[in-house]
Image: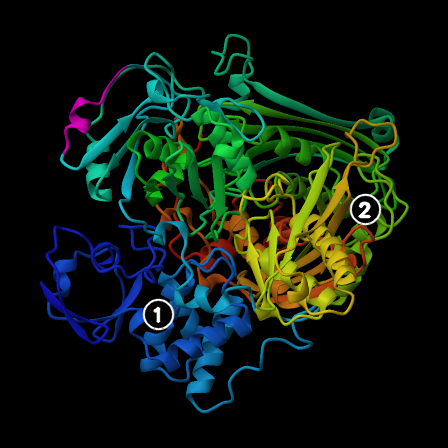
Amino acid sequence: MEFTLNGAQVVVEPRGQSLLEVLRDDLGLRSVKDGCAPEGSCGACTVIVDGHAVVSCAQKATRFEGKRVVTQEGLTEADRRLWAESFASAGASQCGFCSPGIVMKAEALLAKHPDPTRDEITRALLGNLCRCTGYTKVVEAIERAAAVRRGAEPAAGPAEGGGGVGARAPRYLADGLALGDTPFVGDMTVPGMLHGALRFADHPRARALRIDVARAAAYPGVVAVVTAADVPGERLQGPLKKDRPQLVAEGETTRTVGDVLVAIAAETRHAAREAALLVDVEYEVLAPVTDPFAAITDGAPPLHPGGNVLSVSTVRRGDVDEALERAAHVVTETFRTQFVEHAFLEPESTLVVPGADGSVRVFSQGQGAWEDRRQIASFLGLPEDGVRVTQVPTGGAFGGKEDLSVQCHAALLATATGRPVSLTLSRRESLRFHPKRHAMWMEYTAGCDADGRLLGLRARIVGDTGAYASVGDKVLERAAGHACGPYVVPNVDVEATAVYTNNPPCGAMRGFGVSQSNFAVEGVLDRLADEVGVDGWEIRWRNALDVGDRTGTGQRLGPGVGLKKTLLAVRDAYRDAAFAGIACGLKNTGIGNGVPERGRAILRPEADGSLTLLHSWTEMGQGVHTILRQLVCEELGLAPELVRVVVDTERELDTGLTTASRSTVLGGNAVLAAARRLRDALDGRPLEALAGEEIEGEVLVDWTTANDADEPVTHLAYGWATQVVILDDDGRLAKVIAAHDVGRAINPMLVEGQIEGGVHMGLGQALSEEFVVDGGVPVTETLKSLHIVPPTGMPPVECILVEEPQPEGPFGAKGVGEASMVPTAAAVAGALHAFDGVRRSRLPMKDSPAARAAVPHLVRVGGRR
């Protein structure tokens, strides 16, 4: 077939592929991204065909015979520069995976409507999903570009105040992210590269009696087929507990439909996937265990050698029975939250290049290069120095890429074939494979005195951790440690249990157990406010933690507690609105609970006067590269463009996973230490005077304690927040006000982006999103069926940045990424109660007018467990 591509005639021989496959695989264009093929729901693959925006993954290439197709690469240089500047200056790219598709959709819009309204922009973006930004800054970027085309002046330069602390500096690699020029793992190619595919289990619980790969191995183009028998090292891996087989062996019992039985390498991705379908498996199907309460009853089949209880976390202080006995008001309520899918836009992907000496080079999009290295080396039976992991910009994660995904499978295929192997999951595979947000059942009883001051709280929490441990014990530990919310509660009795089932595994997701328990404690507080006869703001003010108070775990707080300032910032708006809900939240910075934590960094001056910053944290849209670069610029007086950032295990900088909002604090302090040492060593000389020298910086936090310590220091710091959700007269989302104490906003634009994106995710958790599982099998197998709030359903978000300095943080910063969504669901529930008088205790609140208005296609999907 022949068509015009970016102004030139091209001829291709379609073999039944989509237009996206022709553009990427046959013609090598990488600005078009594959986020959900062949679903056509995310918009990352958007191109312009004869002037119309089209998703290229959902239609056969043959439909475009004779048509004019334009991708990002075909825009004029002036237009590319305009979009890059608009997205960079507005902060519209976070992870950036969705950005090229959004640019093409916007380009088509402006060609028809040069001066679009905000409503017209959000309607145009209905086919484009952005999980990071909440769309606020995307809309702003499109408005900026439209204004420039109409004759307005372009956006101002890089940032007010240069690129140091406090500047609204553009994101590192912002131009390349907006234009699709910055490669993600799935965009990378190397000579001789093979493509991998996986064969997944058909049943959540079944004994794999026979795995026959003969037909798969004989498929044309197949180079290697590997099974559990081919693993030279340890098959069981996991970030905390080695309980997940990377390949299930014959005779073993599957625990989830995300289990992998076989991995295949072939000359093309199509051949590998077709071959995977030819693996024949004979099963003895067993009844799955899908109810966590049934899983812990006598007689339940043990899903792991140690039984079905992964962990029990407790927090106990004082005498709760006595406190509740003397309380003027006592309420008891059971709350339930759902499984939630991360919906990061970049599906799991890895490229592995084998070395002649048996080593491997891994290009990863995981959340911890050194953790990847540890587990891959263990799996392959190699020393850790035989595995080098290079961190590639990650197209979103939100905790969902803490666990290994396809790194081990690709590495095994690469060593088996002696050739590079690229392995990328489809969206459907991704949905069934990686861990989700824990569904939780939370029974709360709380009492207060006649004035509404809390006296005691009892909570029993059960979390469905699914088939494997992942980090489920820590998620439930965090839910327990934050069960009292950001309030003074002198008497506490909390128990949180993580339970194995045959549901998809659950692990880290933004909020990490705290968004669930926060929904419960805030709901209890609202019910107590009704009993006392005060409003939601007043009862929170009377109980809010401050310097010198003790948290629910008993940690006495030092400086850096801005909760009351966030409450004051929203008081009038809450009380002036007819239908408003309010909720507070806190979220730990750092893992804490007695786990030693480090930040490490290296600064290397180069001969050309530039500086290389080597650190250990994954850039997945939160902006860690940008923040750490700004700290370097602040200390050394450098222009941002002189600082290059690298994350690679070639240097020993292991600090664990990028999790718990700790990269700014731990990474930032390490960078500051290195920068100050470098500044002293330079002693006024230019950078090139020390070209090639590597200046190290390190910080150690080894003074936190377990929850049950006599004088606990549970975490090194906390982020604090108050959010208000306002509904209009029809019960629709009208506005969200988010006041967050971030310690110091190293980059206010990036902080706003984190809050706006967190609110968007929180609204989805509150109203519409649910990963539905029936009998251990996912029912929601598409992005559309997740019911993520679309751009038309996203209300304005007013960000109020409170900066109460945290002594332990760089320039007082304390992190915001996870705290940004913690209070949202409870604030929505409060607003709905103000509107219709109904107290809701289960998420998502699909029955509400706010949900139906925000997500018009919202319907019941499948059954509930």
Q: Secondary structure at mark 1?
A: helix
Mark 2 belongs to which amino acid?
Val
Q: Farthest top residue?
A: 299
Q: For the residues marked 1 and 2, what is the alpha-carbon distance in whole angstroms?
A: 52 Å
Q: Nearer the viewer, residue 675 or 115?
A: 675
- Let me know if residue 848 is in the magenta part: no
Q: Secondary structure at mark 2?
A: helix
What is the crowding at mark 2: few (fewer than 14 residues within 10 Å), some, or many (at least 20)?
A: some
- In the rendered image, which quarter is residue 713 located in? top right
- Name the mark nearer the viewer: 1 or 2: 1
**Residue to which mark 1 is pinned:** 105
Q: Is residue 575 visible?
A: no
Task: Name the N-terminal-most of marks 1 and 2.
Answer: 1
**Residue to which mark 2 is pinned:** 532
Do callouts 1 and 2 mark residues in contact (Cβ within 8 Å)?
Answer: no
Mark drawn on residue 470: none
Report the span colored magenta: 210-219
Please determine whether, in this image, residue 583 is positioned above or below residue 289: below
Name the residue at 44% across, 22% down.
235
Locate residue 387 relative to residue 809 in the image: left or right.
Answer: left
Q: Quadrant of the N terminus?
A: bottom left
Name the residue at 43% across, 82% down.
146
Name the residue at 61% across, 44% down.
511
Q: Nearer the viewer, residue 726 or 776?
A: 776
Q: Nearer the viewer, residue 508 or 180?
A: 180
What is the crowding at mark 1: few (fewer than 14 residues within 10 Å), some, or many (at least 20)?
A: many
Q: Position of residue 821 (x, y in %)?
A: 61, 51
